[in-house]
Image (tube, rainbow, N blue to C red):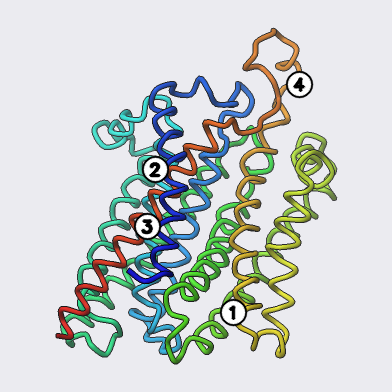
Amino acid sequence: MSARRLTAVSVLVTLTIPGLYGLMWRVRSGLVDTDLSNHVAWGLWVALYIYFLGLSAGGFVLSSLVYGLGVKQLERVGKLAVLQAFVCMLMGVAFIWMDLGHPWRFLYVFTTPNPMSLLSWEALVYLIYLAILLAELWILRPVDSPEELTPEKQRVLKALALAGIPAAVGVHWGTGALFAVVKARPEWNTGVTPVAFLASAAVSGAALLMVLTTLFKRDEEHFPETMQFLAKLTAGVLIFDALLLLSEALVVWYGGVEHEVAAYRHMYFGPYWPVTWILHAGFGLVIPFVIFMSPKLQKQVPLLVFAAVSIVLGIAGYRLNIVIPAQVDAPFHEMVTAYYHVRNVPDYFPTVMEWLSSLGVIAGGCWVFWLGRQLLEQQHVGHAS
């Protein structure tokens, strides 16, 4: 084992140990040791659920540019993008599974489906999407570039890629719709919400692929060109994402309806302002946009990597701001003083158990990704020999 790989495994083991403890804590105590309340019923796990689903959908769309539309500039990272999409989807599903008070009741979605429920349709889309990803990974096992595929496999892969685009869009658009139909939360209840979910998914998915390309493809000949192409794609979607966020905020502030403005006030000027202005706006939007759009700066690969990492972290902050501030302000202010209970408080900050269990899921996802890479590389070596 090389020194680089040994270091990576050592770090991963170090993260896994407290993560496993957090997962066992979650199994043992249920939701008792969370900071979830009558007001904030969706917390850190739901934020990470939509975050990783976005990383998955964004990665799959990029892979479809290779296998569905034949974009040559990304052909060296197409398989990596499919693996990213698969692992991130598993992690997203794991987070929403942990958020259930009785996790095994997720089976009710399949055993007693409700055709009028958006969640029932989303569960079906998730299954279709995962099946497409597994089929693509199976076909891509022995190859490292599209040219190594037989014509028959190329046709099948193209069909899967094109069929997977609406599935990937459905995964994250539908997740955004789950928020948008909650009429009691004005920040969510807009037609822009599902589209904003898709835009931020494309941005974060492309940024994560840049990070993974740096980790696994930086020694290859076309690495700088691939990074610059991804940076240009990301910059374009970043503009669209920022425009959606700005439009939504300006309309709400201009309307001046108090119960609609409340969540934005918490985000921009309340306790969540560092996440909004520093993490999301600064690191997630402004800094990467400047780097990606500068002809001089975009030629410096370390800066591109820094910008990509900034986006990955910034969009994580954006997901937290979507979920939590909208719930802090009670739909009826009398609810806060109606009766006293430790769970009847309009406030939320993740507990140690929530952080550690989240670390456990992330560490588990990293192990799955690492093992997936090993299997794909072994298949490629076996095929080459």
In this view, 25 is above or below 249: above
Front of the two marks 1 and 4 = 1
Circle 3 residues within 10 Å: few <14, some 14–19, many ≥20 = many
User: Which disc number belongs to residue 246?
Assistant: none
The amino acid sitting under disc 4 is His
* Front in this rendered view, residue 320 or 24: 24
Q: CA distance from mark 3 to mark 1?
A: 23 Å
Is residue 123 rendered to the left or right of residue 278? left
Residue labelled with disc 2: 94
Q: Say which label, 3 or 1, has the lower sequence index.
A: 3
Front of the two marks 3 and 4 = 3
Q: Say which label, 2 or 4, has the lower sequence index.
A: 2
Residue labelled with disc 1: 231
Q: CA distance from mark 3 to mark 4?
A: 41 Å
User: Which disc number belongs to residue 333?
Assistant: 4
Front of the two marks 2 and 4 = 2
Quarter of the N terminus within the rendering: bottom left
Q: CA distance from mark 2 to mark 3?
A: 11 Å
Q: Say which label, 3 or 4, has the lower sequence index.
A: 3
Is residue 307 rendered to the left or right of residue 56? right
Residue labelled with disc 3: 87
Question: x, y percentage for residue 29?
Answer: 44, 21
Residue in the image at 60% along x and 26% along y: 35
Q: Say which label, 1 or 2, has the lower sequence index.
A: 2
Question: x, y percentage for residue 383?
Answer: 15, 81
